Image: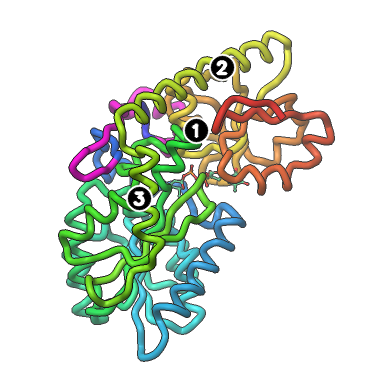
Amino acid sequence: MPLANAFLTRDQFATEFFYELRAACCRRCMLVQIVDQPPRDKMFHDRYPFFSSSSERMQIHFAKLARAVIDHHSAGGDPLVVEVGSNDGTLLEHVALAGIRHVGVEPSASVAAVAAARGITTWRRFFDESVAADIVDRHGQADVVVATNALSHVGDLHSVVSAIDRLLSAKGVVVIEDPYWAQVLSRTAFDQIYDEHASYFALTSIQRLFEPHGFVVFDVDPVDVHGGSMRYSICRAGTRTPSPRVPALADQELTIGAFDASALAAFSRRVDAIGANLIELLQKRRRGGTRIVGYGATSKSTTTINYFGITPDLVEWICDTTPAKHGTFSPGAHIPVRPHDEFSRPYPDYALLFLWNHAEEVRAKEQAFAQAGGRWITYVPGVDET
Ligand code: DWN
């Protein structure tokens, strides 16, 4: 499998990096994870092409999360908010505008530069215990540590939790938000599995990760972003009263057998059925002389395209709104990526919705495509044409 975000030019084809993508479940940690995560500096680097602000819906989501962080966890005194994996500052911008002290920690220069240009204090480093110590030395301990779609990307989880322990004040709060394994399982959202996503958390996983470090999950909130995520509110044991939602969710995870071998085997069978059905449909539509364009050069699409064997003769090209991806080719299958503006020039007969987690936003934006007779091909949770 190639790296999910390694969109490349022709001259890079010969040196393209591949690794073995395998997912497994640790019964002790109750954590679904990939077995071999590539070196972190191959995934997160100066040219990292994913910008959190690429979705209007996510901009709104992060504005609401920032409001909650400010209202519930940053009242009084002179609080410090630290975001781990702060990307282009889409969340911290609101904290900064509220006049609250903040530090973003982001290893990828491409996105960190955008945050800095927006006036957000951004440290371009991978978050670890040395960074935590440096922040404490310079700014004091943090009242809030936020990590959205970041902790799931970390290979050495305990070292990062130790760093959070070093950074967080005695009564501080940690807010973690990541794709929720029970949703990935129930929606057969197999394409969430790729190199950047080292872990696929559930509440039980987060509890077994944080509790040995003296933390407890005191609240959980399902959030409908990125295909179904969960927000975990975490504190030092004894500093807050846990919500009854926490044990209820833990019981629910046991009831649905989220980590049972039978559930994982059934998931695997469903994925292979989706692949067979999708390839059959794409081939049938192409034999009929129709044109198919991919919609959204997402990280997730790299898994779909390369695991199912989708090639440029099935999907002509992929439209995308990120300038850094324009003129490149998709990882592995080398399907051309072109600007979204070309999607309507002329519309294809079918659009394969790689960006399924933003389906509502996309369908609203592309009503003219449907009105022109265009049809969407989707594959999560199953293959469908609409
Ligand atoms: O975990 C991660 C999530 C938060 O974001 C990262 N590891 C990488 C990334 O995953 P993704 O690439 O699957 O994210 P999205 O938001 O599903 O897709 C982003 C891509 O889609 C960008 O290249 C921009 C493009 N896009 C588009 O072409 N039209 C996005 C939107 C909203 C659109 O309308």
Q: Residue 197: horizontal and vertical position, in percent?
A: 35, 42
Tell me what residue is drawn at x 50 percent, y 64 percent: 90
Q: Crowding near pointer 2: few (<14 within 10 Å), some, many (20+)?
A: some
Label 1 CB less than 8 angstroms from ligand 1: yes
Q: Is residue 67 visible?
A: yes
Tell me what residue is drawn at x 61 percent, y 57 percent: 56
Tell me what residue is drawn at x 51 percent, y 34 percent: 328
User: What type is the residue that disc 2 sits on?
Assistant: Asn
Closer to viewer: mark 2 or mark 3? 3
Question: Which residue is denoted by mark 3 in the rendering?
Answer: 251
Closer to viewer: mark 1 or mark 3? 3
* Helix, strand or loop for disc 3: helix
Q: Nearer the viewer, residue 32 or 334?
A: 32
The quadrant in which the N terminus is found is: top left
Q: Report the side of 350 relative to 76 (left or right).
A: right
User: What type is the residue that disc 1 sits on?
Assistant: Ser
Residue 260 vertical position relative to residue 105 in the rendered view, above or below: above
Tell me what residue is drawn at x 32 percent, y 74 percent: 241
Q: Residue 3: horizontal and vertical position, in percent?
A: 37, 34
Question: Which residue is denoted by mark 1 in the rendering?
Answer: 301
Q: Is residue 90 magenta?
A: no
Question: Which residue is denoted by mark 2 in the rendering?
Answer: 277
